Image (cartoon, rainbow, N blue to C red):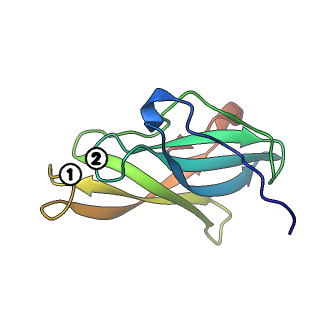
């Protein structure tokens, strides 16, 4: 409820003018805003994050990307969060697999990663 608030803008070179698909979670009393940046149909698509003082900001982006292409997995994006019954926080995301990026030859798979925040820094495993 209320006026929209801009939390992040595409101001880092790796984002190529695009930030999209935001998802926020809370850990250790801090708000973390994860988002996708760059062109979704490329291996340059990646996930960045910002630390926010509250749900409506202000937010400070980490230098990124936080999660980028790697061996056999390219263009990760679409971060979302859930907590399992034991209280463990998880991140789901999608990425291109099989060496082909982009449609019609490429395929995007769903990945689920355990998320932790040692010293306030997100770590996926």
- Label 1 crowd (10 A; few <14 / some 14-19 / many >=20): many
Q: CA distance from mark 2 to mark 1?
A: 6 Å
Q: Are marks 2 and 1 in contact (CB under 8 Å)?
A: yes
The quarter of the rendered structure image containing the N terminus is: bottom right
Tell me which label, 2 or 1, sits earlier in the chain: 2
Which secondary structure, mark 2? loop
- Does residue 107 appear left or right of residue 38 in this picture? left
As drawn, 89 above or below 65: below
Give me the residue at 63% from left, 59% from top: 88
- Label 2 crowd (10 A; few <14 / some 14-19 / many >=20): some
| Residue matched to label 1 | 101
x, y percent for residue 69:
32, 40
Q: Quadrant of residue 24?
A: bottom right
x, y percent for residue 10:
55, 38
Give me the residue at 21% from left, 56% from top: 102
| Residue matched to label 2 | 42
């Amino acid at each position: 409820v209320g006026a929209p608030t801009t939390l992040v803008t595409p101001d880092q070179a790796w984002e190529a003018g695009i930030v999209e698909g935001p998802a926020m979670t809370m850990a250790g009393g801090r708000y973390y805003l994860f988002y996708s940046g760059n062109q979704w149909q490329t291996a340059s698509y990646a996930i960045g994050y910002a630390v926010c003082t509250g749900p409506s900001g202000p937010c400070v982006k980490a230098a990124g990307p936080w999660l980028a292409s790697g061996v056999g997995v390219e263009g990760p994006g679409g971060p979302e969060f859930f907590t399992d019954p034991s209280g463990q926080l998880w991140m789901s995301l999608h990425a291109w697999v099989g060496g082909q990026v982009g449609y019609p030859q490429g395929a995007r798979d769903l990945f689920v990663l355990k998320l932790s925040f040692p010293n306030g820094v997100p770590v996926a495993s």
